[in-house]
Image (cartoon, rainbow, N blue to C red):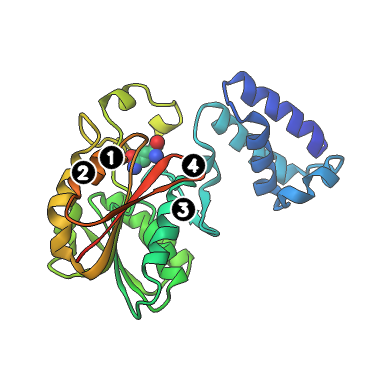
Amino acid sequence: MTAGEWLARAAARLAAAGDLDAAVDAEWLLCEATGWSRSSLRLRRSDALDEAARTKIDAWLARRAAGEPLQYVLGSADFMGLRFRCDPRALIPRPDTETLCERALKALEGRRKPRALDLCCGTGAIGLSVARYRPDARVLLTDVSGEALSLARENALALGVQNASFAQGDLFAAAGDERFDLIACNPPYLDAADMASLQSEVRREPALALFGGPDGLDFYRRIAREAKDHLTAGGALLLEVGRGQADAVRAMLGWAACAVYEDLNGIERVVEVRAI
Ligand code: GLN
């Protein structure tokens, strides 16, 4: 079977299974199984798929058709130009969160050997990106979930990150009484209504990483109360927020000047405050 034939069949099967990105997902599966680049795909449509690639890719296709998120099937997700191992131990890193990460790196500009904290680190996407792009920083990643932390540790190893450490605990409980130049957090922020109407793929991700209490804002309330005691003078607190939450979160953080940044879809996604 040629690559083109496989792609056509796979896209049809995924579309029939309700995958809204069927054609693109089929291409991802093919490229990951063969090692081909996305850009070379057009030129390779008439190439034959060897037996080994077929076996692997058909197994992946079955999993994707059964509703598993693409990144769990592939076992990885790209974030900030880095590849993160990905599985149901933690939330899949989203492109939206790159907005937070870019702002985090910006907040550290001009600070030598900064100390950074990634709260609710999940895969480690935020904290490990900061560590990779700022080798002089020391980054602490924390999560309440031991499973998420084990995945974040694996990612640190795979990415060759040596300036990161890990601690398990609920929000600031794992951070001790240290102060940080940057605290970045993408907490669970979906509310009860969101949880009741989750996309089927998202339902495969850990609910612990998604549910932010009845109105989705529980974690921000706690962070707003506690963050001040963990920031250095001029230190930045950066929070990812859900659609429509920026104003409420900004009001909670009334203790300093706030900035709000939009993601690439024009949705207010990141709230930043600086400690005085
Ligand atoms: N952005 C995620 C979603 O919409 C939610 C992530 C979170 O709760 N932090 O599925």
Point out the tag, 1 or 4, that comes first from the N-terminus: 4
Q: Quadrant of ligand 1?
A: top left
Residue for badge 2: 251
SS state under label 3:
helix
Residue located at (48% from left, 64% from top):
158
Point out the tag, 1 or 3, that comes first from the N-terminus: 3
SS state under label 1:
helix
Position of 103 relative to 53 (above/below): below
Residue 207: where, in percent of width, then height? 30, 35
Q: Amino acid at mark 4?
A: Tyr
Mark 3 lies within 8 Å of ligand 1 (Cβ measured): no
Residue for badge 1: 247
Q: Tell whether 73 sits left or right of 50.
A: left
Mark closer to the observer (2, 4): 2
Instruction: Calculate the distance from the C-alpha at mark 3 to the C-alpha at mark 4.
Output: 19 Å
Quarter holding the N terminus is top right
